[in-house]
Image: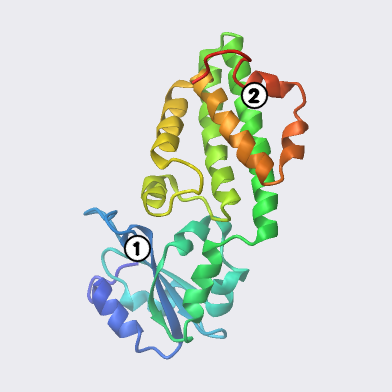
Amino acid sequence: MTNSQHPFSYDAFVERVAADPAVVGLVLKGSRAHDGMTTPYSDHDLYVVVADGTETGPARFADHRGPGLDLVVVTLGEFRGAGMPEWERYALARARVVLDRLDGGIARVLADRARLDADEAFRGSGAWLDAYVNSLYRSVKNHRDGLPLAARLDAADSMRFLLELLFALDRRPRPYNKYLEWELARHPLPDWDTDALLRAVDHVSATGDAALQRHLFTLVEKAARAAGHGGVLDAWGDALVLMRPPVGGAGR
């Protein structure tokens, strides 16, 4: 909803809307909040947080919009969690505070979104572990049975679940694919070699390499058991044998 008669740049919008007493916070997300990730096509994605009881929605700021300015208008109560979708969690985890009239209250919301609580992380990592093992098992079984396309597709699925698992084990929301390398370069996962992990994810996703999948599983199994998820793994019973490197084999 761009107003062609009064187009606002990002800086002009921030200056004007900051004068609105109903606005208690401005939060910049997306590529503009990630150093080095902007392109000529990057918008300014901005949350406008208004006091509870205030009229919200695009109409409130319709005459403030301009080219390259994408606004999400929410009440403070919504921003604190009641109305925020889970898929926005990473965006908020790495967002930048532009305006905070709550003495750090806006920044605290972002910090909370960046860190999963212990119970949430344990439940989530257990579920992602099971999903990862399920896709891994299907992939190596399809590889064994001479079904290369199915094996590659299941391998690619397993890498998505693996990343969810590893970030949940570190009590962090998984970054969007666009920001995966950016995130790991600045905030590596404990006990994981970033370059080796990214190479493995790339190679397995592209080829379904069964030997590399089994090698990777040995690392995942160790980390998962250390985190208390042995029961999830043991529930797979004898199927674990197919997912581990062959006894006495060279492996990867």
Q: Position of residue 78 (x, y in %)?
A: 57, 73
User: Would you place residue 249 above or below residue 131 in this image?
Assistant: above
Mark 1 vs mark 2: which is more N-terminal? 1
User: Would you place residue 44 above or below residue 193 in this image?
Assistant: below
Q: Position of residue 46 (x, y in %)?
A: 38, 69
Question: Is there CB contact under 8 Å for labels 1 and 2?
Answer: no
Question: In the shown orientation, is residue 53 left or right of residue 60?
Answer: right
Mark 2 lies on a secondary structure that is: helix
Residue toward you, 120 or 149: 120
Q: Residue at x 58, y 55 (%)?
A: 171
Residue for badge 1: 33
Q: Which mark is residue 137?
A: 2
User: Would you place residue 47 above or below residue 90 in this image?
Assistant: below
Mark 1 lies on a secondary structure that is: helix
Q: Residue at x 42, y 35 (%)?
A: 196
Q: Position of residue 33 (x, y in %)?
A: 35, 63
Identify the image quadrant of residue 12.
Answer: bottom left
Q: Is residue 10 visible?
A: yes
Q: Which mark is residue 176?
A: none
Q: Position of residue 242 (x, y in %)?
A: 66, 18
Residue toward you, 135 or 67: 135
Q: Residue at x 45, y 33 (%)?
A: 201
Type of amino acid at the residue the image marks with label 1: Ala
